[in-house]
Image (spheres, grey):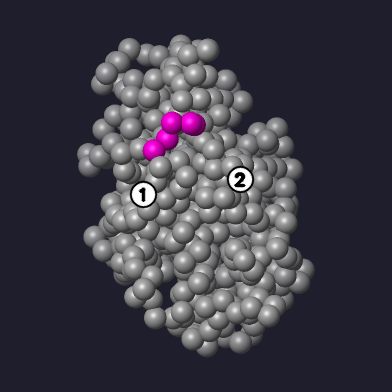
Amino acid sequence: MALWLFTLLLFLIAQPAPSLAIIHDYNDALHKSILFFEGQRSGKLPPDQRLTWRRDSALNDGSTAGVDLTGGYYDAGDNIKFGFPMAFTTTLMAWSIIDFGKAMGPHVSEARKAVRWATDYLLKATSVQDVVYVQVGDAFRDHSCWERPEDMDTPRTVYKVDRNHPGSDVAAETAAALAAASIVFRSSDPAYSQLLLSRAVKVFEFADKYRGQYSASLPNVVCPFYCDVSGYQDELLWGAAWLHKASRQRQYREYIKKNEVILGASENVNEFGWENKHAGINVLISKEVLMGKDEYFESFRANADNFICTLLPGISNHPQIQYSPGGLLFKIGGSNMQHVTSLSFLLLAYSNYLSHANGHVQCGTSAASPAQLRRVAKRQVDYILGENPLGLSYMVGYGSHYPKRIHHRGSSIPSKAAHPAHIGCKEGAGYYMSPNANPNVLIGAVVGGPSNISDAFPDARPIFQQSEPTTYINAPLMGLLGYFSAHPNPNEWSDD
């Protein structure tokens, strides 16, 4: 253990100083951010699988419940399929393509494949009327093991929400994901797009009719992992907003306006992530106003402006938003990069909506241009890619200096090709505690990053809050990298 601590100490104090003029390859980072999702795949892998150290896994998922729940993504460094964060991941991947797909160039087809791997699973999880299968695997048993997904021998228990055990939050997020993805496939696969949209309508009806929090229906299953403590109201508005965008049906427009106050759209919440959608709702709906399509939603633009003002350094004095000495947006809690990428995505999306409307954000006596918002978002992306006090890229495989001991079972244990024999639940403990670098490089994975405003990062597998990657860190980053790969130079932005 002394060697382990000594290794960490050396890592923290002996880092190279970052270059004063770093030129980032956003195109390469975009490619890798999408490739990461191949390392998170569950089920039977396709012939074109590029992270070949992964193999088929969880091929019987759903069999205990008489349904096919194979496929989908493992959420992070474990081997559980959590439906709530998977659906949010899917929504954000889809939004990334909707807003920034044209900037992704040839990588947009890879991004669509990543979305489809998720939506194929979500269609299976919603195949039974008024039922959403929301989790596969016993998280407590899984988290007590350190083993490859290919070797899993923990229970693959199936959990669901239904009429008697509602889960409006997870169901409405699933509806949002399906609706958003229907836009992604509208041109490339119209039949699949229509299937996604029609399923989204049915799932949203279920979420709205049978109201309740899924963490109340499944308290000892989803908590403390993915509890929804903020309530299901935001997800209902979020789901309706995406159905309105995807279908253009008046009923969803009326639903949003009718429930704006009841469901708390104006709540001053400066968060956006798998658990809280308030900021995302206001930014998404504001596009209607800024594009001159619907003044009906003017209040949402006011909410969005207020939210954006809380994120701007030098303007914001919000107690929950801080910036580290190195420039990283920081919120108290674990896995800070999930906030960095999600909030930066909203800054970028809103900047583009404002730019098209020749608008700006009024923050008290200060006004912020679209380009100012974009610079804040770009600064966060650049920090992730290595422009920080440690000179460390927080994206695995990008650059020459990145985390080597990430909290990820499949990455940290020798692959099936290197070690064909079964590695059991407790047999992986030695790999978990090893000071050695992970043998399998999970290219494109972005880890949780610094957990305090000192910019410090211990490259330590056991410190999962900082060293674990998640799908919902990468999903919004796809959009950010897509945009900056096509527009890397702020001097060429004309909306300052």
* Magenta-highlighted residues: 12-16
Q: Amino acid at mark 1?
A: Ser
Residue shown at 38%/70% (left/top)? Answer: 490
Q: Is 359 on the left-hand or right-hand side of 314?
A: left
Q: Dot 1, how many residues are within 10 Å of its Cα: few (below 14), some (14-19), or many (20+)?
A: few
Q: Amino acid at mark 2?
A: Ile
Q: Which residue extends farthest right?
A: 262
Q: Is residue 166 in the magenta section?
A: no
Q: Is 287 on the left-hand or right-hand side of 301?
A: left
Q: Is residue 106 visible?
A: yes
Mark drawn on residue 19: 1
| Relative vertical location of residue 419 with respect to residue 337 in this rendering, above or below | above
Residue shown at 70%/68% (left/top)? Answer: 265
Mark drawn on residue 64: none
Mark drawn on residue 453: 2
Q: Is 188 on the left-hand or right-hand side of 270?
A: left
Q: Is residue 15 in the magenta section?
A: yes
